Amino acid sequence: MSAGKGSERRSQQGGYTLIELLAAAAIAIFVLFGLGTLYLATTRNVALGSAQAFVQRQGTLVEEELSRLLLSATGVSVGTTTPACGPGGSAAAALLFTRTDDSRWCVYEFADVGDSFPQLYVCQLQAAPATACAGQARNLLAGAVRAVAEAELRVANTTFTPLPGALTSAVNIRFDLTDGTLYSPLRFGLSVYVRN
């Protein structure tokens, strides 16, 4: 009879015991923690995927612009035969090329005033000295700042390598590009074969 009175009293109160409430709270905390972790991981992966797509698109645009510039090239020079171009001839990596209208151009990696990181520049060269830009150099990555994260693209490891044994002037152009949020930079490149 006493067992009957206890269940009768419990059904009349209609509540939960402290142990039941603590167990439910622990389960709820565990589930919420798991959902929070899933949300943060998903958000991080979406941001990383967005950054990678942005860098991939900008790198492709730079490759296309370089291809367009070099389409009418009649000669290229790199390496020790090329004097450095850029501001004060200080660019570490440079590619000089002549176009069909006999104008000389230069592509180089440089951190100019106002640049937080090195960028790729192109400029038409003066007649003398042959390494000084005639007018303003154009940043090939201009306008490529992400509106969401305000991350500026960074160029690194730009190389201009002549292709040995080529029947015509030929050069490999390679550069790394990142926006600082990627785990490692993306590598871009193209090969240019100049026909006289």
Image: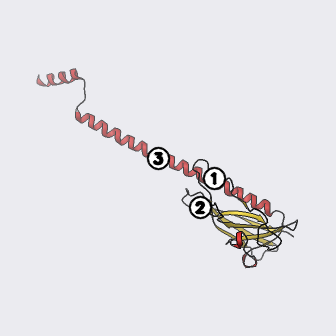
* Residue 82 x/y as whole percent: 75, 76
In terms of sequence position, does the residue under pointer 3 or pointer 1 come before the other?
3
Residue under the image location 73 percent in, 79 percent down: 80
Estimate the spatial distance between the alpha carbons at disc 3 and disc 1, rounded to whole Å. 25 Å
Q: What residue type is labelled 2?
A: Pro
Report how many numbered discs are placed on residues in the image. Answer: 3
Label 3 SS: helix
Of labels 2 and 3, earlier in sequence is 3
The N terminus appears in which quarter of the rendering? top left
From the top left corner, tell me how far across and down residue 84 is, in percent: 72, 74
Q: Which residue is drawn at 11% across and 24% down?
A: 2
User: In the picture provided, is 189 more to the left or to the right than 125?
Assistant: left
Task: Classify mark 2: helix, strand or loop.
Answer: loop
In three-dimensional space, the C-alpha distance between marks 2 and 3, rounded to whole angstroms, equals: 23 Å
Viewer-closest of 140 and 162? 140
Asked if disc 3 and disc 1 are in contact, CB closer than 8 Å, the reply is: no
* Residue occupied by mark 3: 40
Q: In the structure shown, which secondary structural element does the residue marked by tag 1 occupy?
A: loop
Q: Nearer the viewer, residue 111 or 92?
A: 111
For badge 1, the amino acid type reads: Val
Tag 2 residue? 185
What residue is shown with label 1?
145
Q: Nearer the viewer, mark 2 or mark 1?
A: 1
Callout in the foreground (3, 1): 1
